[in-house]
Image: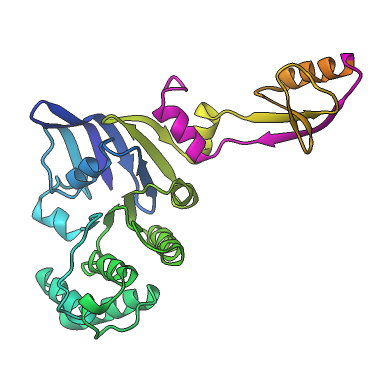
Amino acid sequence: MIDVRDLRKEYGEFVAVEGSTFSVDAGEVFGVVGPNGAGKTTTLKTLAGLLEPTSGTVEVAGHEPGDTEMRRRLGFLPEESPLYEEMAPLSYLRFFADLYDVPRDVADERIGDTLDRLELDHRERPLGDTSKGMKRKVAIARSLVNDPDVLVYDEPASGLDPLTTNYIIDFTRELADAGKTVVFSAHNLYHVEEVCDRIAIMNRGEMVAKGTVESLREQYGRTEYRVYTTVPVDGSEPTDRGHELVVDSMDAVDRVRERAAAAGGEVADIRTTEPNLERVFLDIAEGRTGA
C-alpha cells in the first residue's frame, strides 16, 4: 500500500530527508522513530501529500501523494491538530464526511461506530469544552470518516495521560488488524515496541536501520550479563547482591568465574539483561553500533 524509493527532501541547502526507501503492506503497523530533527515529520507529511519530495518516488495506495484519489484513501493525523472548537464532535465529523462526499446515513453509522470504539462520550458538547484526550480521539475519528485504506499518524498520543495513550495505541493496532495500513511516529519507544510490526530508525535525515523489533535487537542490541561474586574481583562494585561486574559475553562470565575462584570465592548469581528498543535506538542514534 505504501512504496517509497530514494526519498529526498531539501529546504534550501538543508537536507531534511536523504535516501529513504521503505514499503508498508496492508494490515501492517510501521513505526518511524528518531530524535528531534531526524526527519520523521517531513517523511510523514510527504506521504500525506503535504510536502513535495525534492527527488525520489512516493506511492500511496497506488497513487502519487496529492492525487485526488489518494487523498480519498488516506487518513492523516498531524502532531498538532487544531479543531473547530465551537463545534460539537458529531457536527464536526459530519462536516468532514460531507467534504469526502460520504452519504449522511453511511457517515452517521461510521462516526457512531468509531466514537463507540474510542469510548468517546459528550458528543454534543462543544470541542472547546472537552479534554485534550477527547480532542485527540475526535481528530482520530476525523481521519477515519472516509474509511481510508492508509493511515499516517504523527505522534497520535502526544501529550496525553497514560490511560488515554494506552487506549489510542491499542486502537492503532485494531485498525491494522482490520486491514488498514498504518504508519506512525512516536517518542514513546515502549509503545512502538508493543504495537509495530516493523520499525525504521531515523537519524539526521536518514533511515539508519529498519526491521522488526526482534531483528533490530539481534543485529544491533547488546546482551549484558551482570555477574555477582562473593569476593572482590578487578572492576567489580560492591552491592547488596555481592560484588557486581557487567560483561557482554559468556566467555567473559567464565573469566570472572576463574578470577573469583583464584581469589577464594565464587560466582553467586548471574542476571541477563536483553536489549530493549530504547537501548537499541540510543546505541544507533549515538553511533555505537556501526549502523
> Could you tell me residue 18's position as x and y percent?
22, 28
Residue closer to the observer: 179 or 234: 234
Please tell me in which quadrant of the rendered image residue 286 appears: top left
| Residue at screen point 82% across, 15% down | 259
Residue 277 is one of the magenta-drawn residues: yes
The reply, left or right, for residue 230 in relation to residue 142 is right
Residue closer to the observer: 77 or 87: 87
Residue closer to the observer: 161 or 238: 238
Please tell me in which quadrant of the rendered image residue 173 appears: bottom left
Q: Residue furthest right?
A: 264
| Residue at screen point 35% across, 47% down | 25
Q: Can residue 110 be seen in the rendering of this structure?
A: yes
What's the magenta region?
262-291
**Number of callouts in the render?**
0
Against 146, residue 44 (above or below) is above
The reply, left or right, for residue 246 in relation to residue 24 is right
Against 90, residue 220 (above or below) is above
> Could you tell me residue 85's position as x and y percent?
17, 74
Q: Residue furthest front?
A: 238
> Could you tell me residue 77's position as x and y percent?
24, 58
Residue 290 is one of the magenta-drawn residues: yes
> Could you tell me residue 128's position as x and y percent?
21, 76
Residue closer to the observer: 274 or 265: 265
Q: Which of the image's four quarters has the C terminus?
A: top left
Q: How is the image coloured?
A: rainbow
